[in-house]
């Protein structure tokens, strides 16, 4: 067979060539714009030409600090299609981490949303490699800024060459993008995505037995474009000429619901905390979400009650998926097999709340400490290992590579069980599993059970040291607006579902839970916070 390279260039050129009339709807800082793929293609080419004039060469890193909108989408294609590397930077990182990753990636250019300029202004003197700063706003005018020589995105696109020819010397193994993990401990770790990996991952997302993304979809990534390439949504949607609905800066559940309604979104993607918020919003009852065929949920475990609520109250099917920055990210996805669709509702829900089967193209195994594979009985726990063409094989210039990449496998650090159907269930992250009296307790299971209580909005469970049992679980709960429950009531609620020793000794009530930059519960901070409350 021919060894033609799989590159990101093919994705954007396909959209330009076959779907020029299809649209990208983009909520920006001041308005909602609608651009066709023809326009996006021309603007992308102009941007590539502008980057080339600014001295960006093959392999150079082009950083972005931006929300989900069409300009960010254009950089997604402009940088890799000229041979450079798109480096999406998490805008919620601390100043220390921001400086670290920009210097570590050696970004040459930074493209920054106007409202995020202060982030960069405050650290600019410590950035060692950035030569050009470009502000992305709806205006050609450059706003007041302490950054000298700041350029305007709209101006350079207007001055660029919309007939610019994308690079032809790209090898499929060349770097197309990079992203740093959000680092719950230590410094963020960089992951580099190859052209080939991105294209194969896009194909994987469009299979009928995965997310089945197609031309007829209207795709809305709520997951930020700085979080694992918005889980690959912009790439696959462009490849297929699907409509894209980009929800823009500082989106709220109300904005998400309004856009879903107005633009007939068919598939959306985000972390569970987003969907908990949306559920509250939909309960206000003023939205038509009948166009939605799937909500793709990943990043942390989707509570079963939430899957049920979306499906039975709003007829919105839920699709639970699992992955990580290192895996581009799709690894597993929970779907019912053909012979499971007639099972009783509870059983179906149980299957769909698991993280599911590995998608075609990847391999997984679950191993015990001694390296042997666990029984596929849904009981025995082990660490999940993954390998395949869109799985990283190292951290970018980082000694920690040797801890996670061994014998050709990625060691995910996730503790899982696998059942006879090959469906995995994440029990916990290795450090979050609670060991009480020599037995393991899954914080994830307890959290999901707590969040199913009608008064509970969010819940996290962490371990505290215990002189007798070694560790014990403590629940931390945020109530829904206007609702409350007593500690005893919540414990009794859990006692009806779990063995007695699983029930947390204490449940603490909080106004909010600390979250990571991508909306997951930040257990490390929570442990610190509760230390004071427990004293
Ligand atoms: P970070 O590692 O910085 O949190 P990632 O987005 O890469 O950022 O997180 C990957 C981790 O998120 C996985 O290793 C796993 O622990 C967790 N995760 C992802 N998807 C799911 C899911 N569907 N259910 C439970 N945990 C998940």
Image (cartoon, rainbow, N blue to C red):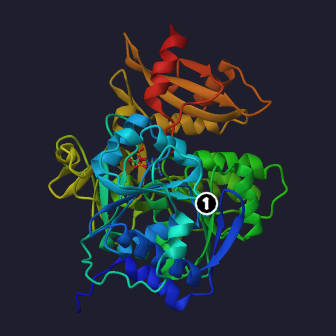
In the image, what residue occupies the spot 27% across and 82% down? 5
Instruction: Give the crowd class for mark 1: few <14, some 14-19, many >=20 residues within 10 Å.
Output: few
Residue 396 picture location, percent across and down: 24, 52
The residue lying toward the viewer, choosing from 425 and 206, is: 206
Taking 13 as reference, is 499 above or below it? above
Whole-percent x, y for residue 315 in the image = 72, 63
Image mark count? 1
- Residue lying farthest front? 149
- Secondary-structure class at tag 1: loop
Q: Which quarter of the rendered picture does the N terminus lie within?
A: bottom left
Q: Report the side of 57 relative to 34 (left or right).
A: left
Q: Residue at x 17, y 46 (%)?
A: 402
Q: In front here: 10 or 304?
A: 10
79 or 467, which lies in front?
A: 79
The x and y percentages for residue 259 are 72, 63
Query: Residue 528, relative to residue 280: is it above or below?
Result: above
321 and 139: which one is in front?
139
């Amino acid at each position: 067979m021919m060894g033609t390279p799989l590159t990101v260039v093919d994705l954007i050129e396909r959209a330009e060539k076959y779907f020029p009339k299809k649209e990208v709807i983009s909520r920006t800082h001041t308005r909602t714009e609608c651009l066709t793929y023809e326009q996006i293609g021309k603007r992308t080419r102009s941007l590539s030409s502008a980057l080339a004039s600014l001295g960006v060469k093959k392999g150079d890193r082009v950083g972005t600090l931006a929300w989900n909108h069409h300009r960010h989408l254009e950089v997604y294609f402009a940088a890799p299609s000229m041979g450079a590397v798109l480096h999406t930077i998490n805008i919620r990182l601390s100043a220390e981490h921001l400086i670290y990753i920009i210097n570590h990636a050696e970004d040459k250019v930074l493209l920054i949303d106007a409202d995020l300029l202060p982030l960069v202004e405050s650290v600019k003197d410590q950035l060692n490699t950035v030569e050009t700063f470009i502000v992305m706003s709806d205006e050609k005018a450059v706003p007041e800024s302490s950054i000298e020589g700041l350029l305007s995105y709209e101006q350079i696109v207007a001055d660029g060459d919309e007939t610019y020819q994308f690079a032809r010397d790209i090898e499929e193994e060349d770097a197309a993008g990079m992203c740093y993990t959000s680092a719950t401990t230590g410094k963020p770790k960089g992951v580099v995505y190859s052209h080939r990996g991105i294209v194969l991952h896009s194909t994987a997302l469009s299979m009928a037995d995965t997310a089945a993304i197609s031309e007829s979809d209207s795709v809305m990534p709520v997951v930020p474009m700085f979080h694992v390439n918005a889980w690959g949504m912009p790439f696959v949607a462009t490849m297929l000429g699907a409509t894209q609905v980009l929800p823009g800066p500082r989106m709220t559940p109300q904005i998400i619901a309004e856009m879903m309604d107005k633009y007939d979104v068919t598939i959306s993607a985000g972390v569970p905390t987003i969907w908990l918020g949306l559920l509250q919003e939909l309960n206000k009852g003023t939205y038509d979400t009948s166009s939605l065929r799937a909500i793709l949920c990943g990043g942390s475990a989707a509570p079963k009650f939430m899957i049920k609520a979306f499906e039975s109250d709003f007829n919105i099917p839920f699709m639970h998926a699992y992955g990580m920055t290192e895996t581009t990210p799709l690894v597993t996805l929970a779907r019912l097999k053909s012979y499971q669709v007639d099972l009783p509702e509870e059983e179906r829900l149980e299957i769909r709340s698991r993280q599911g089967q590995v998608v075609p193209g990847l391999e997984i195994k679950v191993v015990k400490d001694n390296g042997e594979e666990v029984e596929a009985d849904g009981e025995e726990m082990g660490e999940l290992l993954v390998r395949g063409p869109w799985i990283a094989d190292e951290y970018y210039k980082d000694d920690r590579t040797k801890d996670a990449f061994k014998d050709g496998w990625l060691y995910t650090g996730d503790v899982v069980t696998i059942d006879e159907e090959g469906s995995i269930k994440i029990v916990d992250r290795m450090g979050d599993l609670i060991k009480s009296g020599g037995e393991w307790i899954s914080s994830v299971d307890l959290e999901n059970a707590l969040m199913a209580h009608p008064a509970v909005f969010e819940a996290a469970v962490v371990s505290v040291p215990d002189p007798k049992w070694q560790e014990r679980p403590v629940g931390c709960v945020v109530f829904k607006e206007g609702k409350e429950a007593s500690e005893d009531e919540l414990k009794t609620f859990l006692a009806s579902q779990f063995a007695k020793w699983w029930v947390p000794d204490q449940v603490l009530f909080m106004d909010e839970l600390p979250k990571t930059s991508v909306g997951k519960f930040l257990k490390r901070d929570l442990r610190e916070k509760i230390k004071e409350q427990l004293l």
